[in-house]
């Protein structure tokens, strides 16, 4: 498990290059959510499961005081290097999102790019408790997660990317256990070197599927105000990505 965040950490940004291009639009929407839903100004943000810092750095570029936290040192090393190169002052902490012990220190907590799917029914309750403790009253938690019930094939999706002089060929597929709402996410990454040699990595992750209604009901046990948005707007029937917005 977690090969994507350890042995492949240096390739993460190349694998998700297309998503990184959309991050500015993503953060425009998050800023709208801060303005519409948080009670009081948002200045200080804790970005949980920050990974290589794709959204973390964008928040810092916009002037927020940001702390990034992630389980994997390999991901944080990439994030620190990128922040240093841009002269951004971001504190990066290695830790488990479930073990955080901040007391009402942040105006907002964020968790981007489906990271919330790593938490099962009981862990997500623990996560909500930790986030709630971390937020000041009126502070907001924002997390996005995908729709896995959308029609379409579960068969392999293949694409390629370039990282320096290496070519990456990425093959994704998924296996869903409907009864348990578990998603087994599989990814084969082949790294083709200029000398013709190939390195192969297999990613095998287990994720938890939540519907918007389930997410809302779970969050309502912990937060005063909970709303599920669609991707960049109010929730619509055709949305394929959802945003949980929960106010302490
Ligand atoms: C899909 S990546 C998202 C990274 C980043 N938020 C982004 O938007 O690119 C998921 C991240 O969650 C982190 N992660 C998984 N479980 C975690 C936990 N219990 N506590 C902290 N980080 C965790 C992984 O190390 C990985 O960096």
Image: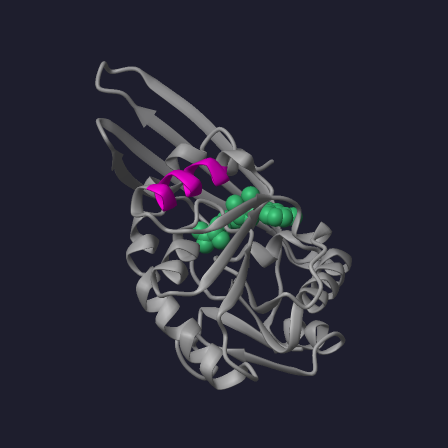
119 lies left or right of 28: right
Q: Where does residue 41 sit, x and y in percent of width and height?
A: 50, 79
Position of 232 relative to 155 (above/below): below
Q: Between residue 219 and residue 237, name the one nearer to us.
A: 219
Q: Where does residue 144 sit, x and y in percent of width and height?
A: 51, 65
Position of 99 relative to 77 (above/below): below
Q: Residue at x 49, y 28 (%)?
A: 7
Q: Where does residue 81 sit, x and y in percent of width and height?
A: 38, 38
Q: Where does residue 129 sit, x and y in percent of width and height?
A: 74, 65
Residue 184 visible somewhere in the drawing: no
211 lies left or right of 130: left
Residue 214 visible somewhere in the drawing: yes
Position of 186 relative to 107 (above/below): above
169 lies left or right of 248: left
For the record, the magenta segment spans 75-84
Q: Residue at x 72, y 55 (%)?
A: 101
Q: Between residue 103 and residue 161, name the one nearer to us.
A: 103
147 lies left or right of 238: right
Q: Between residue 195 and residue 30, name the one nearer to us.
A: 30
Q: How many marks?
A: 0
| Quadrant containing the C terminus in the rendered view | bottom right
Position of 148 relative to 198 (above/below): below
Q: Residue at x 32, y 68 (%)?
A: 25
Magenta residues, dominant SS class: helix
Model colouring: one colour
Q: Residue 58's quadrant in the figure?
A: bottom left
């Amino acid at each position: 498990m977690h090969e994507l965040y350890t042995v492949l950490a240096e390739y993460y940004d190349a694998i998700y290059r297309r998503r990184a291009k959309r991050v500015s639009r993503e953060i425009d929407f998050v800023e709208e959510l801060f303005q519409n839903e948080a009670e009081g100004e948002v200045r200080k943000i804790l970005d949980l499961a920050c990974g290589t810092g794709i959204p973390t750095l964008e928040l810092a570029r916009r002037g927020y005081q940001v702390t990034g936290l992630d389980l994997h040192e390999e991901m944080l090393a990439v994030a620190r290097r990128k922040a240093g190169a841009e002269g951004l002052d971001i504190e990066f902490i290695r830790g488990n999102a479930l073990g955080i012990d901040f007391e009402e220190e942040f105006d907002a907590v964020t968790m981007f790019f489906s990271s919330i799917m790593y938490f099962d029914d009981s862990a997500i309750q623990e996560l909500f408790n930790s986030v709630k403790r971390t937020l000041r009253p009126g502070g907001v938690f924002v997390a996005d997660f995908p729709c896995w019930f959308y029609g379409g094939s579960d068969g392999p999706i293949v694409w390629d990317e370039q990282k320096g002089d290496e070519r990456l060929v990425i093959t994704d597929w998924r296996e869903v256990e409907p009864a348990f709402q578990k998603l087994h996410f599989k990814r084969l990454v082949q790294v083709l070197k200029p000398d013709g040699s190939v390195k192969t990595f297999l990613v095998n992750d287990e994720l938890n599927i939540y519907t918007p209604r389930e997410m809302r009901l779970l969050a309502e046990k912990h937060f005063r105000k909970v709303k599920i948005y669609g991707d960049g707007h109010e929730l619509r029937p055709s949305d394929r990505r959802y945003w949980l917005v929960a106010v302490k």
